[in-house]
Image (cartoon, rainbow, N blue to C red):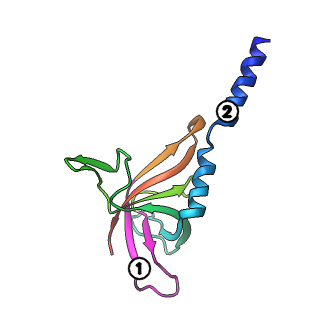
Amino acid sequence: MFHLKMTLCQEEASRSMIDVKRSFKKVLREWGHDIYIQRILLNGNHSNKFERVTTRQVGQSGITNSLSTSEAQDGLFTKYDAVYYFEDHINPKEGDRIYENFSLKVSKNYTMFTIDAVTAVRGRMGKIDYWIVGATREK
């Protein structure tokens, strides 16, 4: 009997927990934008393919990830020009390129970033909920 009550209590607690992955997808739907990623290859070159993905990006302020910030007298500052958030299945790597305002038809007036740091944000059972990357502006 006690074991049954414990199981029901755990189930109820589990249902009331925030679903981080679902919340993250909602943020992307409401405030995300599309960019293109160009993957780095094992030989150091970049693929000729561009993947269109939805992301959420923040600039120099608004990030408190310890791997992407440094503390100064004025507060926390990112070490990167931009910080991006990606869904779990994107699997970004250091060296990948991110293209903002990019069109496959016209290759002018875009901004290119190189991913310098990648952090997997993990949830229940160690599964990746989403990715945070720090990127440096190249163009």
Pinpoint residue 53: horizontal percent, then vertical percent. Answer: 55, 66
Say what amino acid the circle numbered 2 marks: Ser
Pinpoint residue 97: horizontal percent, then vertical percent. Answer: 42, 67
Which is nearer the N-term, disc 2 or disc 1? 2
Judging depth in this view, the residue of 105 and 73 nearest the camera is: 73
Q: Which residue is situated farthest in the right direction here? A: 1
Task: Give the magenta part as a residue range.
Answer: 96-117
Residue 14: give its label: 2
As drawn, 6 above or below 76:
above
Whether residue 98 is in magenta: the answer is yes
Pinpoint residue 85: horizontal percent, then vertical percent. Answer: 48, 57
Label 2 CA crowd tier, 10 Å (few <14, some 14–19, many 20+): few
* Quarter of the image that includes the N terminus: top right
At horizontal 63% and vertical 37% (from top left) the residue drawn is 17
Pinpoint residue 63: horizontal percent, then vertical percent. Answer: 38, 52
Q: Secondary structure at mark 1?
A: loop
Callout count: 2
Q: Which residue is mark 1?
A: 110
As drawn, 24 above or below 100:
above
Judging depth in this view, the residue of 59 and 80 nearest the camera is: 59
Judging depth in this view, the residue of 78 and 30 nearest the camera is: 30
Whether residue 6 is in magenta: the answer is no
Q: In which quadrant of the rendered view does residue 124 lie? A: top right
Q: Is residue 111 visible?
A: yes
